[in-house]
Image (cartoon, rainbow, N blue to C red):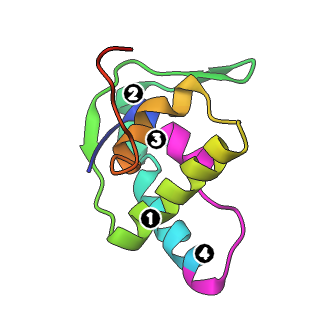
């Protein structure tokens, strides 16, 4: 799945921090896939100031993930929505991972 730098940073914050053994094993692998290599750090020139992270470009990377990993992300985003804690930062990712649930109405 193609994910931008922004998407990857958001997903790293959304991944479950607790769960059963199998869930945490999947989350650990997914976290490693979403993280940034030393080469990417050099390429994107990450800077953090006052809690805000900036980078030089927002290219995409194809992140391989299985169905269970996608389900974990979808459930984490849905939980934020159910708790009324979903923000516009999560919006596009919510639609990407919960596309079956999204009902779009062009007349809105």
Q: Position of residue 34 (x, y in %)?
A: 43, 52
Which numbered disc, 2 or 3, marks the residue that appears first in the sequence?
Answer: 2
Q: Are marks 2 and 1 in contact (CB under 8 Å)?
A: no
Classed neighbour count for the residue bearing mark 3: other residues with Cα under 10 Å, few (<14), some (14–19), many (≥20):
many
Measured Cα–Cα span from mark 3 to mark 4? 21 Å
The answer to whether residue 31 shows anywhere in this view is no
Q: Earlier in the sequence, mark 4 or mark 1?
A: 4
User: Residues under labels 4 and 1: Cα distance?
Assistant: 13 Å
Residue at the spot of label 2 = 44
Residue 86 percent across, percent down from the top left = 62, 35
Q: Report how far apart the C-alphas of labels 2 and 1 lie in the structure.
A: 29 Å
Residue 63 has which mark? none
Q: Which mark is drawn over residue 94? A: 3
Which residue position holds label 1? 71
Q: Which residues are magenta?
A: 9-22
Q: Secondary structure at mark 4?
A: helix
Sequence-wise, the earlier of marks 2 and 4 is 4
Return the x and y of residue 40 as percentages of the image width and height: 37, 39
- Is residue 32 part of the magenta span, yes or no? no
Foreground: disc 2 or disc 1: 1
Q: Residue at x 53, y 34 (%)?
A: 90
Q: Mark 4 — residue? A: 24
User: Does 56 appear above or below 21?
Assistant: above
Side of 2 relative to 14 (left or right): left
């Amino acid at each position: 799945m193609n994910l931008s730098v922004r998407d990857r940073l958001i997903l790293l914050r959304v991944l479950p921090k607790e769960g059963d053994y199998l869930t945490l094993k999947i989350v650990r692998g997914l976290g490693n896939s979403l993280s940034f290599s030393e080469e990417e750090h050099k390429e994107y020139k990450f800077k953090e100031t006052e809690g805000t992270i900036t980078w030089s470009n927002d290219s995409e990377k194809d992140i391989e993930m299985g169905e269970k990993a996608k389900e974990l992300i979808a459930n984490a985003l849905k939980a934020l929505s159910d708790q009324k804690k979903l923000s516009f930062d999560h919006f596009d990712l919510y639609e990407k991972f919960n596309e079956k649930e999204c009902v779009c109405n062009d007349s809105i």
